[in-house]
Amino acid sequence: MGNNVSAILQSLPKMDDLLGGVKDELGSLLSIAVIKRLCQQVVSKKREELLAEMTAAGSPTILKSKEELREAIIGEVMFLATSLINPRLKRVINATGVVLHTNLGRSPLSARALCGVVASAMGYSNLEFSLEDGKRGLRYDNLRELICSITGAEDVVVVNNNAAAVMLILDTIAFGREVIVSRGELVEIGGGFRVPDVMKKSGALLKEVGTTNRTHIDDYARALTSSTGLLLKVHASNFKMVGFCNDTPLSELVALGREHRIPVAYDVGSGSLVDLSRYGIEGEPMLAEILASGVDVISISGDKLLGGPQAGIILGKREVIQTIAQNPLNRALRVDKLTLAALEGTLIDYLQDEEVVCQSIYPLRYISRTPAFLKKEARILTKTIKKSCGNKFSLEELAGKSFAGGGALPGYELDSILVALENATLTAEQIATKLRMAEVPVIVRVANDKVLFDLRTLEQDDYAEIALALCELL
């Protein structure tokens, strides 16, 4: 037994030998310290495997030679090294038709926003520096004039997401005081986070009024006390209530707040700067109209219908916003220069005519696509796949539905065109799995044992990569 153990240990290559072999393969891609840790990890694993085989079978199934064992270990180290070097956060092709896919990063950035991020990331910036007088500035200064010109707001604060925006508003205005909100608006957002939980963490005291399906202005009025700190309205951005229901208009809440000198906040959620009714989508509130109602403060997501980076944008009356900005919690929730650069580029896009905006801003670009346009694109995708893959797949065009997703436009389905794909030897699930593992992952839908490519969320530049992935999986 002892001799066998000794033979196993002697068959393993020396560390210096492994380091030299791996370093020759990798060059300067990894430091010696990282390579050494990987080699130690693989050698330890191989040692345990050989000893386990010896214990189970009486003798280990050792490779034919010490050199083969060395090459096997170097191969495993190279695999781990390659895994470390390759980015884990990858660009993927979204063929699901879900425009704001939460798990796929929601909105792609416009070209202008992307250029802003690159320019800001490549060097220093005037993030908190006034170029006019050479003194310290505020990081919101560069956005204030732009966003206020577009929306009509008096001032703005930006934090890392909309849940943070709501928490900061509540913590600033209503810490230790009652916040009156309709039962029908106590929603749960992504990841299991719920409005009541956010309110509790903010230090505000939740006071529910009305019923699940109907809440009237009188319900709010009867709930007012000397402890009331805020009237809160939450937009139903991730669900839709139909039937016997009543939603108290914002204008009535604002009037009640003015009468009793109580501020009114509106968690708008998605937030749209473009009238979507021309695309058959009714009822989505526009920011300019909301702010014109006289509401004190609103919050929106930057990465939903706005089409920018993940952010929580707080807009409203100057006095309220400046108080929020001075809250110490704001520093913990603030965004960095890359987010601000992306948001600035996105907002500059909105200074253009609506037709141009709907091409520059990706969510609007995809929402505004017509079935006729998608049908033409489906033919191009089908032709591209056939040209690359021949007759290895059967393809057909189908009418289908797309979705806004990402907590936006609840209940709305968008008419779309799909390309359905089948293979004689692989199931749809097998194809979908292999497409996810492609060099550029392709995310699809599967239904009735068919792989479905929804043209709504695809670009022509994606077609060749989809065809390549399909050819390689066979």
Image (tube, grey):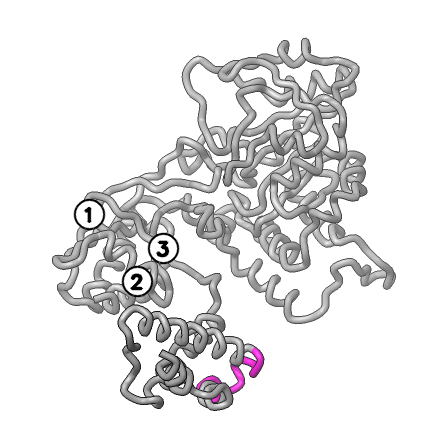
Give the image location of residue 272, x and y in percent: 54, 39
- N-terminal of the pair, mark 3 or mark 1, is 1
Of helix, strand and loop, which one carries label 3? Answer: loop
Residue at the image position 25 percent from the left and 65 percent from the top: 473
Looking at the picture, tell me which residue is in the foreground, 44 or 354: 44
Residue at the image position 79 percent from the left and 44 percent from the top: 328
Q: Is residue 84 left or right of residue 320?
A: left
- Whether residue 257 is visible here, answered yes or no, is yes
Q: Quadrant of the C terminus?
A: bottom left
Q: Quadrant of the N terminus?
A: bottom left
Could you tell me how far apart the alpha carbons at marks 3 and 2 are, in whole angstroms? Answer: 10 Å
Q: Nearer the viewer, mark 3 or mark 2?
A: 2
The answer to whether marks 3 and 2 mark residues whose Cβ atoms lie closer than 8 Å is yes
Q: Which mark is residue 466?
A: 2
Instruction: Give the amino acid at mark 3.
Output: Leu
Residue identified by numbered label 3 = 458
Looking at the picture, tell me which residue is in the foreground, 142 or 14: 14
Residue identified by numbered label 1 = 449
Residue 126, located in which quarter of the rendered image? bottom right
Could you tell me how far apart the alpha carbons at marks 1 and 2 are, in whole angstroms? Answer: 19 Å
Residue 344, located in which quarter of the rendered image? bottom right
